[in-house]
Image: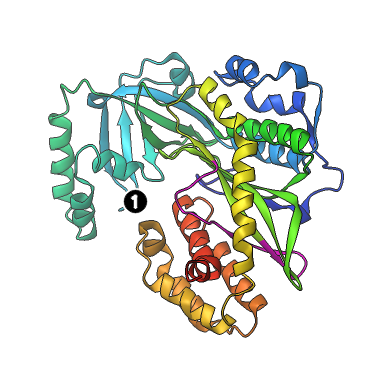
Amino acid sequence: MTYEVGSREHFYYSELSPSDNGVKVKDALKLIENSPYYDEVYESMRIKPIENEFIPIKGATSLIKLVMQMDKRFTKFDITSKLKDVKCSGLLDTKNAVLEFSNVEDIEALKITGSDIFKATTRYSVKSDYLDKIYNADKYLNYCHNRGYEEFIKESLEYIEENNEDSELDKQFRLLKSRSNDCYVRAITSVDSYKDYNIRFSVFIALISLYRLTKSHKEEYYVRYSSASESDIRVVFRRNERKKVTNGIEVGFELELVNDEIKREAVKFNGLFSIVYDNTKTVSLKPDINAKIINFSHKIGVKKVANLLKGLPEAIDEFIAVMYNDIKFVNKSKSPEELKKYLYLKVKNSKQKEFREKYKKEVQKMIEEENVNTFYQLLDLMNKVDLLIDDSDIKAKDYWKYKLYEVLVKGKRDSQ
């Protein structure tokens, strides 16, 4: 079966098997069995004393299965290459190009490609990263492409190649090979400072950290939602305990894991408000667009990651204390119609690039057309927009959740 790069799979808690009550630590270890950081993780996170214990997080087995399945869709490999050994063979459109690699020396990469010269199609932001961030040429070449100036494109790429012949600058290229033997470039990173804290790694440390939290705080968590592609994942772990706001509406805490293997983003553990309404429906709010409960870059070492995670229980306690102070303002919000108008203005005035360019017009139209007479209907509208924004658009998703917080909580709180 052939898969598109970036295609996603997801599940909700309601779709899980009743038998999925968690996973054994030794089974979760399969996530990192091929990781270059296995020994460091095993040691720094003190896995040996708990290796035979059970992680009582409902949905954990399904989460691991999802991650493993997505990881098998493509063969992932990295190569370090001098820029003089990489050239752009041409543009496919304004978002994708073809890069040609030559003089490949990495033995593992050669086993996968079968040759020291191969071509790969760019995906995600690689075309822009290569042509713009390295050569400041992407916008100009897109201009030429849109106007059919193929000769200008050819001459420009040849000029870049000629002036690159003596470049000794190294870059790491992160690649995929499909089952049909097509190759794709999914990211360009630095050679020395990038550590491959991939999806498997992040899910493993999340499960271990939450296991220790359930033991120390006597709290229960489950996987409410997970969405993943071959290169990114978003998982929402919900704490069972919730607090009643008003009839039919409760507020609880959610820990959101976000990891993107292709960007320069950090691995993030976000704190979210979960507003549960109409028994099972949920809207998540993010109280600060920049603040994370814990985050770490792909540059720091495993020991530092482990030390940061030791502070997770305290960080969650602090977040929940603020959350419980803020939830009273949800109950004091204005009428649903007024809140809808306020939400529309937030969208109309939005300046965050990813949200503005990809979703702003469609969200405005959705808000305009939706009838909102009750608070439940307002929350439903917010939910529809959240589903519209792709999980891979991490910045846009975070931005939207923060706008919801501003509409439902922040404005009323700050006016007190």
Instruction: Identify the residue at horizontal 75%, vertical 46% (top origin).
Output: 222
Circle 1 packing at 10 Å, graded few (<14), some (14-19), many (20+), is: some
Give the number of callouts. 1
Residue 334, relative to residue 122: is it above or below? Answer: below
Q: According to the image, label 1 marks what residue?
A: 95
Percent of width and height locating residue 168: 21, 20
Residue 102, relative to residue 182: is it above or below? Answer: above
Is residue 226 among the parts visible in the rendering?
no
Percent of width and height locating residue 74: 55, 35
Instruction: Identify the residue at horizontal 63%, vertical 31% (top origin).
Output: 205
Q: Quadrant of the N terminus?
A: top right
Instruction: Identify the residue at horizontal 42%, vertical 70% (top origin).
Output: 347
- Which residue is more in the foreground, 303 or 120? 303
Left or right of residue 152: residue 84: right
Left or right of residue 81: residue 177: right
Give the farthest residue toward the front: 416
Name which residue type carries label 1. Lys
Residue 331 lies in quadrant: bottom right
Is residue 67 among the parts visible in the rendering?
yes
Left or right of residue 174: residue 307: right
SS at mark 1 in the image: loop
Instruction: Identify the residue at horizontal 65%, vertical 50% (top origin).
Output: 254
Residues in magenta, as a range: 275-293
Residue 382, relative to residue 162: is it above or below? Answer: below
- Which residue is more in the foreground, 173 or 60? 60
Percent of width and height locating residue 315: 59, 40
